[in-house]
Image: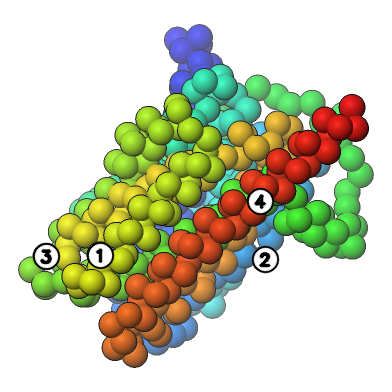
Amino acid sequence: MPALIRSPLFVVLALWAAGLGAAAQFAKIVVIFPELQAHYGQSGAASGYLVSLISVVGMLLGLVAGVIAIHIGVRRLLLSGLMLGAVISAWQATLPGFEWMLASRVLEGLSHLAIVVAAPTLIAQLTPPRRQSMALTLWGSYFGVAFAGLALAAPSILQHLGLSGLPAIHAVYMIVLAALLAAVLPAGDHSNAPPWPSPGDIIRRHVSVYSSPFIAAPALGWLFYTLTFVSMLAVLPSMVDPASRPFVTAAMPLASILSSMTFGNLLLRHMTAVSVINTGFAIAIALVLVFLLAGPDPWLFIALFAALGLVQGASFAAVPELNASLPDRALANGGIAQTGNLGNALGTPALLAIASTGAAAGLPALLIGCYAGAIVVHLSLARSRAKKTVASISET
């Protein structure tokens, strides 16, 4: 048994389970959102902060979490995030006043950020190279799986345990997972950690990271992906026949996960991660053109999400493929967290504003612009990487 729980497969599954806990920090609010609004007597825009405040933290501090990982160690960052998440969920289970609940969501953003930066970095570090793409594709499914699972479980939990049930169960889940990972993750050596950076150093680090064609590439492509993914889940189902909406709403994210785990893994065996990302965006552009010409269709929208599933897994696989060192990988995952939260924050208002104009070409034009922009950015960064590689070889 000790050999089993310390095997790479078990550790990867445990780290993926940590991702489920991080995604549940969003899902535990979203799936009972109407009930929370009723409990707090908040039905306006203020109630939306219960969901969005956790994203604001990632948007502002995503890359800072990568810097912290370099200084305290990725393992320590992950365990701190899990334990902080457990404490916050236990506090939320007491159903504190609305302002205190909002404050807890800000702190929970720190916990979420620590997990989503540290866990994929550790997966890439602890997985054999030939299994990295498969393991990181699995990691990329954590958000959809957690949402689907909690959406199914929430009605029963509400019925038997009330509003306190979900955060209480989440608190137990997080602390158990922290104990498990503390036991199975190898301890790191931080004796040579660099001195803590000053605020000026943090700003310079942002500039250096986002100007690096190696570290920044996964994050910049991820920005275009997140600008449309969550927002399309909110907008596209309203365009199909009402009888088909529940099926489409559930099938779109599931198609993305299935595509990522099957076709995505297959392509990653024969293509670079960036090539798979660009393939997913190119197929998405073709499907959006069909949407523009033929109009909305349930299966067309499901196929669109399947295409984006290629982007999902390959974006995380690109981190270790482009970055050999652990510090660079931590920074790259921090960048993904930062741009992902930025895309989620900006994408839904933008798509809703365009959809509300009633212009038939508005939504397809935005989607095509995003996906074409992602391809252009990735191709441009690939050329920059090639030039740097040639220059490095010439110097040696």
Q: On the image, numbered disc 1 is attached to which residue?
A: 290
In terms of sequence position, does the residue under pointer 4 or pointer 2 come before the other?
2
Placement of 371 over or under 242, stated as above or below: above
Of 18 and 218, which appears nearest the observer?
218
Q: On the image, numbered disc 2 is attached to which residue?
A: 60
Say what amino acid the circle numbered 2 marks: Leu
Please state if 207 lies on the left or on the right of 314 as rendered: right
Question: What SS does tag 2 mark?
Answer: helix
Say what amino acid the circle numbered 1 marks: Val
Say what amino acid the circle numbered 3 marks: Ser
- Give the label, 2 or 3, closer to the camera: 3
Question: Dot 4, crowdedness within 10 Å: few (<14), some or many (≥20)?
Answer: some
Q: Residue at x 83, y 62 (%)?
A: 203
Q: Quadrant of the N terminus?
A: top left
Real-space CA distance between mark 3 and mark 1, rounded to the nearest whole angstrom: 20 Å
Of 6 and 304, which appears nearest the observer?
304
Placement of 78 over or under 217, stated as above or below: above
- Callout 2–callout 1 Cβ contact below 8 Å: no
Say what amino acid the circle numbered 4 marks: Leu
Q: Residue at x 91, y 44 (%)?
A: 195
In terms of sequence position, does the residue under pointer 3 or pointer 1 come before the other?
3
Q: Residue at x 52, y 27 (%)?
A: 132
Q: On the image, numbered disc 4 is attached to which residue?
A: 381
Real-space CA distance between mark 4 and mark 3, rounded to the nearest whole angstrom: 41 Å
Question: What SS does tag 3 mark?
Answer: helix
Q: On the image, numbered disc 3 is attached to which residue?
A: 244
Question: Dot 1, crowdedness within 10 Å: few (<14), some or many (≥20)?
Answer: some
- Callout 4–callout 3 Cβ contact below 8 Å: no
- Callout 2–callout 3 Cβ contact below 8 Å: no
- Give the label, 3 or 1, closer to the camera: 1
Real-space CA distance between mark 1 and mark 4, rounded to the nearest whole angstrom: 29 Å
